[in-house]
Amino acid sequence: MAGVSTNGRQRSGRQSERAAALAGLLQQECARLLELYAERESFPSDPESRAQLVVIPPLTAQLSTAEKIGFLHAALGECLRLLEEVIRREDAEFSDVEEDEYKTQRRTVQGRLGHLLISTERLLVDGKTCAANVAAVPDSMDNGSFALKKWILQVLQDLEYWSSQAAVTLRSLPERAKAARRTGRGARRLRGRLRR
C-alpha cells in the first residue's frame, strides 16, 4: 500500500512538472500574442494597469496546494472561455483581416491553453473544483470597434497574467512534493533507528 502511495506521489509530481513546463511555454506565447496585438492595433507596448477580468483569491501560503490548483484551474478555464469569445467577435467584426502572425499565434495560444486546462484538471484532488469570478462579457460595445479592441486587449492581458501565475504556482508544486518525499524518507530512517 505504501508503494502505491509513493507511486501516486511520483506520478503527481511528474504531472505537475509537465503542467509547469506547459504553463511556462504558454506564458511566452501569451506575451508574444499580446505584443503582436498591441503592434497591430497601435496600442502602447506597456499598457496602463487595470483590474483583472478574471479574479480568484490570492494564491498565498494560506491556501492548500489543492485549493491553489483548483482556483488556478478555474481561472484558466475562464481565460479560455474569454479567448474563444475574442476569436468569435474578431472573426465576425473584422472578417476582412487576412491571415497573419497574430491569428496564427492566437490559435497556438488557444490550443496550448486547452492542453494546460486538461493538465491542471488531472492535478485536482478528487476532482474538486473551485470557481473564479469573471467580469461580464459585454453584449455589445457602445463605442464600436475601438471599444471592442480595448476589451480584446484586456482579455489578452489577463491571458498573459494568468499564464504567468500558472507557471509560477505550478513550478512550486514539484519542489514541495520532493521536499515531502525527502521528509518522509528522513522520518522513516529516524523511526528505524529508534526501533534498534
Image (tube, grey):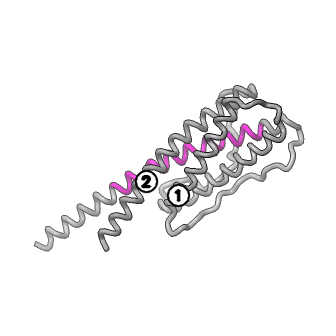
Does residue 155 appear to the left or right of 69 in the view shown? right
Give the quadrant of residue 117.
Answer: bottom right
Q: Tell me the residue at 31%/74% (across/down).
A: 1
Q: Position of residue 85 (x, y in %)?
A: 75, 48
Q: Amino acid at mark 2?
A: Leu
Please state the horizontal and vertical placement of residue 175, each as a whole percent of the image: 37, 51
Q: Quick one: 127 or 106, which is closer to the camera?
A: 106
* Residue 170, placed above or below residue 50: below
In the structure shown, which secondary structural element does the residue marked by tag 2 occupy?
A: helix
Could you tell me which residue is drawn at 16 percent across and 69 percent down? 192
Q: Is residue 86 left or right of residue 126?
A: right
Q: Could you say which disc has been placed on residue 4 in the image?
A: none
Location of the C terminus by quadrant is bottom left
- Mark 1 closeness class: few <14, some 14–19, many ≥20 residues within 10 Å: many
Highlighted magenta segment, given as a residue range: 150-178
| Disc 1 to disc 2: CB gap under 8 Å | yes
Let me know if residue 116 is in the magenta part: no
51 above or below 196? above
* Horizontal arrangement in the rendering, residue 93 relative to residue 122 (left or right): right
User: Which residue, given by chain and number where applicable, does mark 1 sit on?
Assistant: 69
- Name which of mark 1 and mark 2 comes first in the sequence: 1
Crowd class of label 2 (few under 14; some 14 to 19; many from 20; radius 10 Å):
some
Q: Is residue 108 above or below residue 191?
A: above
Residue 134 drawn at (x, y percent): 71, 54
Q: How much space separates mark 1 and mark 2, taking CA atoms?
A: 9 Å
Residue indicated by mark 2: 173
Q: Tell me the element at label 1.
A: helix
**At 66% from the left edge and 35% from the top edge, which residue is drawn?**
104
Residue type of the residue flagged with mark 1:
Ile
